[in-house]
Amino acid sequence: MTDLSGIRRGAIDDLKAQGVIPAEMARSWGISRARLSTLAGHGPGPERGLFVSTPRPGATLTIATVRRRAARSQPAAPMLARDAVAKIDRLLSGMGMTTAKEVITATGWLDLNRDVAVLASPRASPLIAQAVTADPAIKWRRDGDGRWILVDVTSGEEFRSGFDDEPHSASASRVCYAHLGRIRRPDGAGGWLYVGGMHEPGTAGAVDFLVGHVELLWEKTRRHQWSTIVRVETSTDGAAILSAELAVPIHIYGRR
């Protein structure tokens, strides 16, 4: 019954997106508007469509990550990666979906022509670096020192991570940026979810933003492909996420 309620709720949401008003739906189905309102609030929400191409009951999203090892500059990286995956797990479980896990190797192959969320920067593998070029609005490039930069193509604005610089002893925080969106699949049949920070704190913060703003993101993007840049403020060591917010508008540019 929960799964059927989710299907019905998604259908009502789709009709609203097409411009069908609640009074017309209720009249067509022979029910009151109050009953329609009750039905629209039961079951998993249509926001499942942010994660899978067909938001059916029991759908599975594969979460692909790189294997994290503690480094002197970012000792909290493995913990941040595990926490990020756990947050997506809990969110999707509440939506009636399941997750599978996959590790991205530096030279390995990753199937993007499926329901998959990639939590990794382009430095993780040449495949990821190539795949994200399908986003026409947000681009990655390297500066003269080989550091990754995020660029909003529409405005020309560039974003650099504070984790590429030595922390200032007087500063209580640092800022990182992440590329977030649903990018066109190589086969053209839909999109795959991308959450890629310049460094691990950026990825973790973007996951926080995604999980905390699911309804907003769905309302703005629905079944389109889209992308944006998230600004993540963290503690100086990157272990604690202090805030995560949009650095640029959400760009919508295609249908699945």
Image (tube, rainbow, N blue to C red):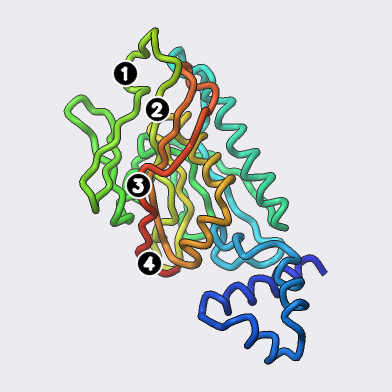
Whichever of labels 2 and 4 marks the residue nearer the N terminus, that label is 2
Q: Are marks 1 and 4 in contact (CB under 8 Å)?
A: no
The CA span between labels 1 and 4 is 36 Å
Q: Nearer the viewer, mark 1 or mark 3?
A: 3
Q: In this view, does 222 lie above or below 139?
A: below
Q: Residue 119: x, y in percent?
A: 49, 41
Q: Nearer the viewer, mark 1 or mark 2?
A: 2
Q: Quadrant of the C terminus?
A: bottom left
- Of 148 and 178, the residue lying toward us: 178
Q: What is the secondary structure assignment of the residue under circle 1?
A: loop
Whichever of labels 2 and 3 marks the residue nearer the N terminus, that label is 2
Disc on res. 248: 3
Whichever of labels 3 and 4 marks the residue nearer the N terminus, that label is 3
Residue corresponding to mark 1:
165
Q: What residue type is labelled 3?
A: Val
- Of 165 and 116, the residue lying toward us: 165
The CA span between labels 2 and 3 is 15 Å
Disc 4 packing (10 Å; few <14; some 14–19; many ≥20): some
Residue corresponding to mark 2:
175
The CA span between labels 1 and 2 is 11 Å
Q: What residue type is labelled 2?
A: Val
Horizontal relation, residue 243 to residue 251: left or right: right
Horizontal relation, residue 21 to residue 124: left or right: right
- Of 212 and 226, the residue lying toward us: 212
Disc on res. 51: none
